[in-house]
């Protein structure tokens, strides 16, 4: 029998972490080796233990799930990241999958189904909850390209439009400067523009409508 795949749970709610851990104990091929309360702890534990799989919450205090995923990838951490969240917002789904998440699962799934999907994702499959697949199938409105941005990307763009530097934005939003750069790359691509100035002009134009 092969060795179990190691898992780290990242969630800022202790009861949720406990519930996920208890659920994963039903699958012998998954072994929880760490828990983290926030993105900063997740980075430290990922460096120390190199888990095979990271179950990542999206909405956390401090670093969001997206910020955490970007930071993990920026540091070269290659664990499979499965997002486990309550959010089925299309913008969140697209942002996390674009950032490299290997799966996007909803916390309100039936426990048996959720365990099956986590196990499949841990073994290398791309896993999505049914509601997530429906959201992906629905294309975002093309009338306003800003609708494609995540909440964090909108926050970054707003500060770019105010003339703040990457370092100033990082300080204001309590994220790493490298994470700000990642968000800017993503929002430029989504808006189909090549510069901060072009993105700012588009932002101001849409705000005035």
Image (cartoon, rainbow, N blue to C red):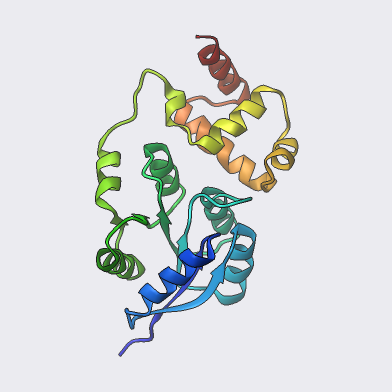
Where residue 183 sits in the image (x, y, percent)? 56, 39
| Nearest the eye: 194 or 142 | 142
Query: Where is residue 141, by image quadrant?
Result: top left
Q: Nearer the viewer, residue 199 or 134?
A: 134
Give the mark count: 0
Quarter containing the N terminus: bottom left
Nearest to the observer: residue 148 or residue 109: 109
Q: Residue furthest bottom?
A: 1
Please identify the quarter of the rendering in which residue 159 is found.
top right
| Residue pictured at 59% horizontal, 29% vertical | 157
| Residue 122 image position (x, y, % from top left) | 36, 69
Tell which of 26 and 167 is nearer to you: 26
Q: Could you say where residue 28 lies in the image, as x and y percent from the top left?
A: 33, 83
Whether residue 79 is visible: no
109 displayed left or right of 174: left
- Which residue is rendered at x = 59% and y = 54% of the image? 71
Instruction: Please say if 132 is above or below 155.
Output: below
Q: Is residue 23 left or right of residue 63?
A: left
- Residue, x 54% and y 74% (percent of image)? 34
Left or right side of 65 for 110: left
In the displayed image of the protein, which residue is found farthest to the top? 209
Observer able to see residue 98: yes
Q: Quadrant of residue 82?
A: bottom left
Where does the image place residue 143, in percent across and percent down from the top left? 37, 18
């Amino acid at each position: 029998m092969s060795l179990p795949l190691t898992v780290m749970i990242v969630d800022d709610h202790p009861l949720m972490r406990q519930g996920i851990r208890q659920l994963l104990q039903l699958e012998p091929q998954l072994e929880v080796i760490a828990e983290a309360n926030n993105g900063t702890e997740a980075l430290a534990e990922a460096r120390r233990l190199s888990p095979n799989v990271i179950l990542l919450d999206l909405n956390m205090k401090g670093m969001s799930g997206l910020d955490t995923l970007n930071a993990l990838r920026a540091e070269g951490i290659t664990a499979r990241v499965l997002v486990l969240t309550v959010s089925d917002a299309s913008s969140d789904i697209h942002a996390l999958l674009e950032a490299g998440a290997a799966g996007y699962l909803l916390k309100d799934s039936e426990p048996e189904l959720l365990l099956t999907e986590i196990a499949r994702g841990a073994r290398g499959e791309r896993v999505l909850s049914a509601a997530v697949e429906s959201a992906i199938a629905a294309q975002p409105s093309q009338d306003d390209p800003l609708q494609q941005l995540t909440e964090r990307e909108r926050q970054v763009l707003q500060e770019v439009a105010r003339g703040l530097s990457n370092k100033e934005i990082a300080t204001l939003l309590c994220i790493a400067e490298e994470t700000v750069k990642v968000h800017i790359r993503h929002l430029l691509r989504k808006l189909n523009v090549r510069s901060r100035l072009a993105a700012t002009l588009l932002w101001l134009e849409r705000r005035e409508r």
